[in-house]
Image (cartoon, rainbow, N blue to C red):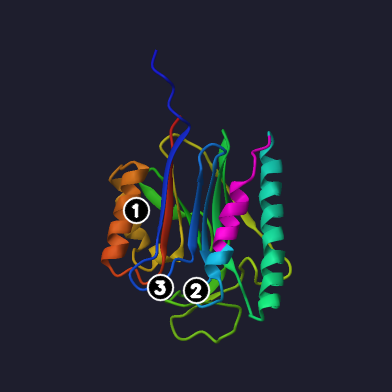
Amino acid sequence: MSPALPAYVAAGRTDTGRVRGHNEDAVLVRDDIGLWVVADGLGGHAAGDYASQMIVDRLGRLRRPDSVDNFMEAIEDTLEAINAELRRTAYERGVDLIGSTVALLVHHRDYMLCGWVGDSRVYCYQDGRLRQATRDHAHGVDDDQTHVGDRPAPQPGGGVLTRAIGAEERLYVDWVLTERRPGMQFLLCSDGVNKEMTDRELEAAFRSDCMPPTLIGSIFETSLARGARDNVSAIVVRLNG
């Protein structure tokens, strides 16, 4: 009797890219508890890498309780504590903001949960179609510089975040539930991926029916070849049985 397949297969990667001096992104792959996270420290602000690494470090320490509701609550409590700490640290350092976006995916035997703050995204690939499961907390179109609020004023084509961890006193995490079917795949990514690849190109990559490590390799090969103006981070999760 052959051993049963694992419930999912996942792969993740982050890269500084070709332009930025250091990597302000961070990723977390916790297959053991069914949790995957991409965090994007805010470019142009102080210590974005400090913020994103804090998020993956703190979430990575969580234990999975029996109830998925309790797990969601633990995730939100952790992010709220980080939000308060980042605001306090920014005040102590005399800077306007130390912040990050976050996108996360939680596995349940009956469904999947996507959570997010900011413009890092979760996509779902099913039946040959790729759709964005999250909705960016931003208005305007992203350029190489992501701003928070209306300061500074966006230039034509610029993006303005309306929500980020560390930006406001109260933190609100949005969640969306999707079905869970064998063969479904999920992509979590920072906006460094979207700056180099369109949704149609990402969909074409998934249609090749590659496994997560191969898909990650393809996404990074394309993004880096096109100049990777921002840090590039992505996680792919494929559901089995």
Task: Tell me the residue that label 2 is attached to.
Answer: 43
Span of residues in magenta: 52-65
Distance CA(mark 1)–CA(mark 2): 27 Å
The residue mark sitting in front, 3 or 2, is 3
- Identify the residue at horizontal 38%, vertical 43% (top origin): 127
Mark 2 belongs to which amino acid?
Gly
The foreground one among 17 and 183 is: 17
Task: Tell me the residue that label 1 is attached to.
Answer: 203
Would residue 189 be visible to someone looking at this image? yes
Mark closest to the chain's N terminus, 1 or 2: 2
Tell whether 101 sits left or right of 215: right
On residue 62, the disc is none
What is the number of callouts on the image? 3
Task: Tell me the residue that label 3 is attached to.
Answer: 21
The foreground one among 20 and 195 is: 20
- Identify the residue at horizontal 42%, vertical 55% (top origin): 234
